[in-house]
Image (cartoon, helix red, strand yellow):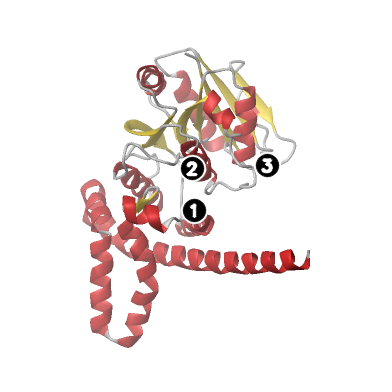
Amino acid sequence: MKISIIIPAYNSERTLVNTIKYIFNSKITDFEIIIVDDFSTKKIKDYIKNNKVKIFRNKRNMGPSYSRNIGAQKAKGEILLFLDSDIYIKKNTLFKIIEIFKKKSIDVLVGLFDERTPNNDFFSNFYNLRMRKGLLDSLESIDFVYGAVFAVRKFAFDSVGGFNIKYKNASIEDLELGKRLFAKGYKIKLDKNLEVIHDKKFNFVRLLKNDFIRSLDRVDFISFKNLLKYKRFTHSSLGQIISVLLTPVLLISILIDIKFFIFFSTLFILLNLNYLIYFFKKKRFLFSLQSACFLFIDLTVAFIAIFYGIIRRIIEFNLYKKMQKIL
């Protein structure tokens, strides 16, 4: 069973060399590496000079969805492993993936971040641990994929037409693909032992911008029926979703009465206590305290994005109805 590793990359010189190095350090050798250069400023073939790595370059910047689809078209393996250009696999990662696909009747396998990250700053660690904890709390049988690291049988990927290229930015293109795979009856498994290192460096602005875009795009996929059934939305817990709705109330309570503020602040902490305890266990008290403060800012930004997204969808729907009447 051959595996094709597909890596979309854009201006990824800092991490991509290490991504390739870790792949070649694998226990197995029967794989191919396909990099799709999404019109990077510095051509990838100028610094990745290995004849075992196939590099294709887009004629203009097309985004990760398009780039992954190009890689899948060029792939010869039965299994497609999609990695981001800042992901470092472990020595036995490829062996694990192949063994799972051989032994189990699954079509898609999703991994998660290791708790370690090469970056020591607060924001990179916060993102890394938050994403990891969200996936650790998820069921093993899921209806989404995580674009940073997931493997899929090529016939399944091809049967749903690959990624939807209307999503040019890295936001919910993986979620949307997972929904289509799940709807077609393909089995998606989250393996919580399939861990990879994530070397993405965040700062205050970059992380808030990332979460604003993702929250905005996810408006299309929120199902209140599934939310109540599974008590979560993809890797976000029901507590975090309620916390998003609580943020404007918490802000208003500051202006009304200190008692209201204390009450809603306590409720906010309780709703996110699971995450904060996890942060404390991994990074101790100061990190957990910083996380509680930043979480409020981050979820406030998420609320603004969701509110804006809902208003935008209502306007678009009304415009669509008016156009239908005219036509």
Residue 262 at x, y percent in the picture: 24, 77
**Is 11 located above or below residue 2 in the figure?**
below
**Is 265 located above or below residue 89 in the figure?**
below
Closer to the N terminus: mark 2 or mark 1?
2
Q: Mark 1 points at which residue?
A: 221
Q: Evaluate whether residue 47 shows in this view.
A: no
Q: Left or right: 94 with respect to 229?
A: right
Q: Name the residue under label 2.
A: 179
**Closer to viewer: mark 3 or mark 1:** 1
Q: Return the mark for residue 62.
A: 3
**Is 258 located above or below residue 221 in the figure?**
below
Rendered-image quadrant of the C terminus:
bottom right
Point 23% across, 58% down: residue: 273
Q: Are marks 2 and 1 in contact (CB under 8 Å)?
A: yes
Amino acid beneath label 2: Lys
Q: Are marks 3 and 1 in contact (CB under 8 Å)?
A: no
Q: Is mark 3 on a helix, strand or loop?
A: loop
Residue sitting nearer the eye, 61 or 188? 188
Residue sitting nearer the eye, 57 or 310? 310
